[in-house]
Amino acid sequence: MADVAPDGASASRYFQSDSNFGECGVCLCQWVCPLEIFPCRHIFCEACVESVDRCPECSATIEQRRRPNVAILELQKHSKGRCSVCGWVGTFENFNHDHVTCNAKPSSSLNVSSTRPPLGSRVGREYMLDGPETNDAGQSNPDFSSQQEQQQKQQEVRSRASPPKLNANALRPVSSISLSAEGIRRWKETVSCVASDYGLSEDEFKFMRDIWPEFATLNSTRTNLELQWCDACRMLRYMNLPSHPNDVIDLFNMAMQPIEGGCVSFESVCLWSSVYRRDPSRMYNMNRKQYSCLLRYAQIIDIEKTGLFNEDQCRGIGEQMLLRELTDLEWRNIRPLVVARAEEFRGNIACAYPTAVSQGQQVNLSLHEIILLYNRFFDPTKKSTGMARSNNNGLSEALQQRIQFMLMH
């Protein structure tokens, strides 16, 4: 087996992808001569569906077969994985072209560790919205400190001139350039793509287009709005898309952009989100309506649009999932697990400050982590027998008043 050239079908058979993207649901190998079937738009190897008249995955009647969009094939080419026979690692494209024999060693340019942020790197600190990195003497990084000092001075001037207010863009670097309302309107007019180009619903596409200017900044040529690294992390978390630094790195790699100084376009994020978005029924045991309501609630309380939630917000999200208020006793039992999960979450991110949450570090959890944590306590599709008195919508009166107050403000 070690001398078999990994080409064509044999290549896909021995390539183990880090994700299930590009995997045929019939042969469970990477697509070979892929075909997209309509109207369900599932993709399989040509040989796997050439003699069937129904989709092997959803049983929908096949009306048409077409080659997938070239952008989807590009995603497959750049998907990372390893050889199932030897220790080779790299992309699917390089596996087909470079991994001729199974004793071949990976190219240094394909070393997975080189694309992952090391402990204490700026990438990890920006992901968790941490402060400046300190050296061995306990002094702050001078470049970061001067930038932070400049931001603080500008914020003080603005606060003296106008009443205090929360601004999502305050989390951006000083060098970022935002658009005016008129500029945002003109940018939306330049968006030529439509939802069907990426397999998104009209609501998903419109929502992403509407919030894009709140996260993106003008590129260096001042010709387009694009996402920098830290803003891409925030936007993916805000939309509850896969947002671990490794996921965001894959997004930048797909867009062929460097992590340091690179930017991704609106079209790239639309394509990436259509492929990697989470299925709430499979991931969270929620139907689409339940999940949409919970996501909208999380976005309402996430005033600064960071996609990271503190301890009080974690409790509020749990109450929204349960459709009642948590008692103090319930919260005392749940809180230690929230704190422990926050510590574990920080430990999975390459941060400058891996301090324990219990030692003063603020709880910062993504919505995805919070839902998975609460699903250990109750089934979101069922109501507890001890719930508080509810109205016709299933919400306790106090919880409904709190939601209405947030909507008003």
Image (cartoon, grey):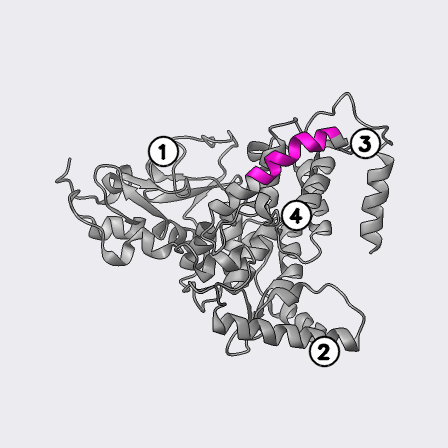
In the picture, the disc for residue 310 is 4
Question: Which residue occupies 50% across, 67% down?
Answer: 140
Q: Amino acid at mark 1?
A: Leu
Where residue 365 sits: x, y (%)? 59, 45
Mark 3 — residue? 394
Q: Residues within 10 Å of mark 1 (few under 14, many from 20)?
A: some
In the picture, the disc for residue 28 is 1
Which is more foreground, mark 1 or mark 2? 2
Marked residue nearer the N-terminal end (2 or 3)? 2
Marked residue nearer the N-terminal end (4 or 2)? 2
The residue tagged with tag 1: helix, strand or loop? loop
Which is more foreground, mark 2 or mark 3? 2
Alpha carbon distance from label 3 to label 1: 43 Å
Marked residue nearer the N-terminal end (3 or 1)? 1
Question: Which residue occupies 59% across, 54% down?
Answer: 195
Choose top left, top right, bottom left or bottom right for residue 183.
bottom right
Marked residue nearer the N-terminal end (1 or 2)? 1
Where residue 384 sits: x, y (%)? 74, 23
Alpha carbon distance from label 2 to label 3: 46 Å
The residue tagged with tag 2: helix, strand or loop? helix
> Viewer-proximal residue, 147 or 90?
147
Alpha carbon distance from label 1 to label 2: 60 Å
Marked residue nearer the N-terminal end (1 or 4)? 1
Mark 2 — residue? 157
What is the magenta range? 329-340
